[in-house]
Image: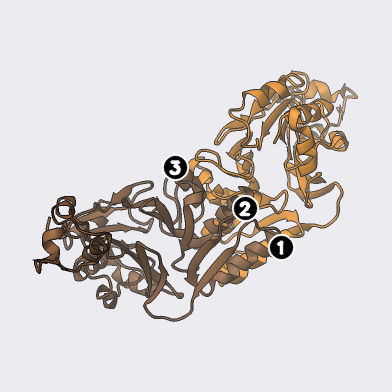
Chain colours: A brown, B orange
Amino acid sequence: MIFELTVLGSSSALPTSTKFPTAHALNVHGRFFLIDCGEGTQIQLRKAKIKFSTINHIFISHIHGDHVFGLLGLLSSFNLLGRKYPLHIYGPQELELLLKFFTTHFAEELSFEIQFHPLTERKNQMVYEDKVLEVVAFPLKHRVPTFGYLFKEKKRLLNIRGDQIRKHALSINQIQSVKSGADIHLEDGTLLLNNELTEPAYRQRSFAYCSDTAVYKKNSALLKGVDLLYHEATFLDRDKKLAKATGHSTALQAAQMAQWSDAGQLLIGHFSNRYKGNEELLAEAQSVFSNTSVAGELMQFQVPLSRFNS
Amino acid sequence: MIFELTVLGSSSALPTSTKFPTAHALNVHGRFFLIDCGEGTQIQLRKAKIKFSTINHIFISHIHGDHVFGLLGLLSSFNLLGRKYPLHIYGPQELELLLKFFTTHFAEELSFEIQFHPLTERKNQMVYEDKVLEVVAFPLKHRVPTFGYLFKEKKRLLNIRGDQIRKHALSINQIQSVKSGADIHLEDGTLLLNNELTEPAYRQRSFAYCSDTAVYKKNSALLKGVDLLYHEATFLDRDKKLAKATGHSTALQAAQMAQWSDAGQLLIGHFSNRYKGNEELLAEAQSVFSNTSVAGELMQFQVPLSRFNS
């Protein structure tokens, strides 16, 4: 039941010899959700040993080259490998231009279907849902239409205790009721309270992705209690005017966002190349939010499974 | 007076964790000529410590993604860095689609001019010339319009020997004549033969690039005596039917091409991922043309300066 983020690319717009443009992969129970897809993403996926076949959903924040150019190569490789499963791509409406350019000129015969889910309205919206996960897109504040994504596990059925099943000889139907949270009335009139029959519930784990964006406090309501927050920190506080002018955040602002959101852990990246090393950016963020880490290529950040009262 | 090829990407269409899609940089006397531009080329250029400002000419073989997708990121970075010098791009007419897509959607305000030189005719044609170098494009045999490129140093002026200048008190005009190959008549009637006054001439060095292509013997006439030949070798001889069907070559055919061209050295790459390791491909090529090497990421192949009779 893994819930883990792998950083594939941590650079801002100008990659270096060691830092790739933006891309991340979230592993939710063994399935990978790709978030942004900068140039070289497919090479980074190979390095991280993430199988292409485990990726069925790609979430794109905005249509700047350093967040999307890797799509062309990745889709080409999916095609060369004869992929059959549909690929779902979520992102601002404008992304369609890139996808159409690709399918028109670089994939006359595509072996798989691309299902594009355009985000046309600037509002919070659930864009994906399965048995264990839901994904909400939310507007960010950048120079072009941009969305962040909140990945959150769904509430799970309760784990019923085996010893209680045996002790009370519970039927299949009774077990299902208990797992859904119900108390049980036995035929002899005894009331069995749900919390005596079950383990404490697992916490729903969550990851939020905010890049690229100026600081945008409003989103902290949606992100309340998020376990792992990735927030861009392109600039240092001393360059906050530049951050505002370009639709980016400072390390301080990223940390404030983590604080406002009661985040468990903050991950910062997308640093401008003007700064040598990460120390100053990290120190600035940690001065406000101590549990901050710097994103680096192929680093992994796991949110462990935990029970509510454990 | 360096003449050196750096391999930036050696893979065929599917990159791996260590092999990038096709790209090469030729250093001619300190200026770099980029040949093909697969995904990640800008990252490989950084690793090779090749300054972006030394690249003014890019030669594209054909419009398959693994040879061009890196253009988008590279042009974006040139723009972000505020490049001023025009960039010359050479390639099949169809490349214009990609360049227009880029300038329309990813570079509203481009800081530099892109001068596209489309190749519209299937014939040998000189596409570039400066004081020291000329570049001839020539047709290859692939599934889409594809061109190879021959880079050849121009004939140099002769080096006049200092001891002879002093001995005969030659004037500036006489020195120029000697450098151009003339004999000299002194006022006293003495005839000084040019080869007594000069060092033997330097050989004109050359590099030819053939990828992607089926074997195409006809080109060996143009390539006669080439110092360094890069020729794709996607398949082994046992898969030659597949090579023919897909417009690719076998290692054996690449070696035959080197033999027909009287090449000095053969470099093979673009191997299909179906083969584990390079040994069999190299052995096959060397069975026909012994001076064969395998192209690998960031490997450099220099053609040393030499005089005709040295």
* Residue A208 placement, left or right of A128: left
Looking at the image, how many numbered discs can be counted on the residues?
3
Indicate whether B175 appears above or below A251: above
Chain under disc 2: A
Q: Which residue is mark 1?
A: B96
Q: Tell me the residue at 76%/32% (across/down).
A: B204
Q: In this view, which residue lies farthest toward the left?
A: A190
Side of B157 where A273 appears, left or right: left
Amino acid type, label 2: Asn
Could you tell me residue B56's position as x and y percent? 63, 52
Q: Tell me the residue that label 3 is attached to.
A: A49
Element assignment for label 1? helix
Q: Kindly report the distance in space between the C-alpha atoms of the residues bearing marks 1 and 3.
A: 36 Å
Q: Chain of mark 3?
A: A
Q: Are marks 1 and 3 on the same chain?
A: no
Q: Mark 2 — residue?
A: A79
